[in-house]
Amino acid sequence: MLLPMLGLLREASFRWLWIGRGASLLGMRLADLALPWLLLQATSSAWVTGAVLACDRLAAFVLSIPVGAWVDRGSKWKAALLAETLRFGATSAVAGLVLGGQAGAWEIALVLASLGAADVLHAAAFRPLVVHTVGRARLAAAFNLNEGADAVATLLGPLLAGTIIGRYGAGWALAADALTDLLAVASLLAARVAASGRQHREECPYSQPEAAALRDGRKRPGFGAWDGFRYLWRAPLARRLALAGCLLSTTSVAVGLWVVVLARDELHWDAERTGWIFSAMGAANVVAVLLLGGLVDRVAWSRLFTGAVALAGTGAAVLAGARSTLAVLMGAFLLDGALSAAFVLQSSRLTAVTPQDRMARVTVAAGLADDGVRALGRVLAGSVAEVGVRWALLGWGLVLAAASPWIRRWSVMSPLGHGVGHGRTPRIREP
């Protein structure tokens, strides 16, 4: 996969798309440390911190369904550009509130709810935009490159955030987040210019009569808004991949909060030293991207996915018992590296088995469940952390270990739920 990855970066349209995504991810990693640190400082409560952070998922419950249908009918590039512009506005607002001394918990919650609306729109648009740009045959390479951008952002972002927070305050770290979103907007504009109408022409997953019915159906207002849910319900592998994504997302948001609580309250580390933990996670993501690039064409997808989930559970258990700096960094390295690989495998597989003309709707259908567990996960993670963050990490490590054999049983399915799926995903029709 390494050669296809390098080949993608030679194409200007994808390269600009990738640069913009990397810039946006870097900003998110700055906020991942700055916001919990700011809220814990202001409220002294892990529960309140988790509840406020969960507000960025509220928009998903209102907007996901209409947004998915709207994106499938229109320009994916325009939707992605609008999403990044909205995100820039929201991050600028929260930075301004903090720097102006007006940032109470509920003010931040309102801005995070607005930020969630931008995230819903971006989630619906970005995957279809990648498919239009590179085609299905190179999806795994494209997703691994995007994960590589996330890995570099996770490596550098926390170090930068910790330094800025320690020297200037959390408000300036959030201002840097806003600047990265502005760069993402500029990169999307450059990607549009570079594409020059050469987006990949996708195969139609429907027969001619079905395609004609779809063309007529699109003329009706609100056409097929729920089709994403219907597809997930009827396609067993897609449905189970969506459930696995919920498990991975819950792990990601819970551990993100638990790590800050562990470092700040248990180990009594400052912001700069806490950034080391997140940077260890970023280093692990870089390693995971490189390893996955070499293994994905040699080892069955199901074995890679199962092993990644089990290894993430091991990392959580190591973190639970860690007392020294080395042990903390090692646990974080194992946990997030494995989680990174699992996200690549899950998201690329789900995208590959989804028909192109309803990809945004399937994405938001899976994302709606994902947003629900992220919001609930943040609140529960904060509540559990009040009792004991080490017990929380150990318990979740056991959950991941128990989920691993469950994933192994169904992940060898073909897209329609029959037989064994190794290697590349076959072309399928809508069930």
Image: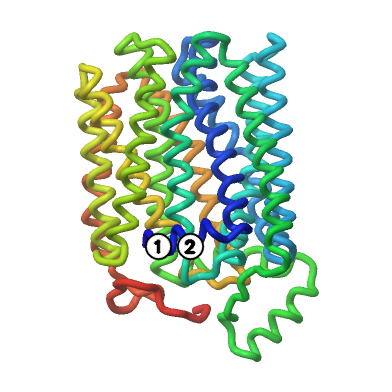
Q: Name the element at disc 1.
A: helix
Q: Residues within 10 Å of mark 2 (few under 14, many from 20)?
A: few
Q: Which residue is mark 1?
A: 3
- Asked if 75 appears above or below 356 in the picture, the reply is above
- Element under disc 2: helix
Name which residue lies at 63% across and 25% down: 109
Residue at which label 2 appears: 7
Which of the 4 image quarters holds residue 301?
A: bottom left
Per the model, the C-alpha gap separating discs 2 and 1 is 6 Å
Q: Nearer the viewer, residue 163 or 318?
A: 163
Specify the amino acid type for callout 2: Gly
The answer to whether the residue labelled 2 contacts the one labelled 1, judged by CB atoms less than 8 Å apart, is yes
Name the image quarter holding residue 203: bottom right
Residues 377 and 21: in front is: 21
Q: What x and y, as percent, mark residue 26?
A: 53, 34
Residue 276 vs 200, above or below: the answer is above
What residue sits 46% from the left and 80% below the top? 427
Quadrant in the picture for residue 399: top left
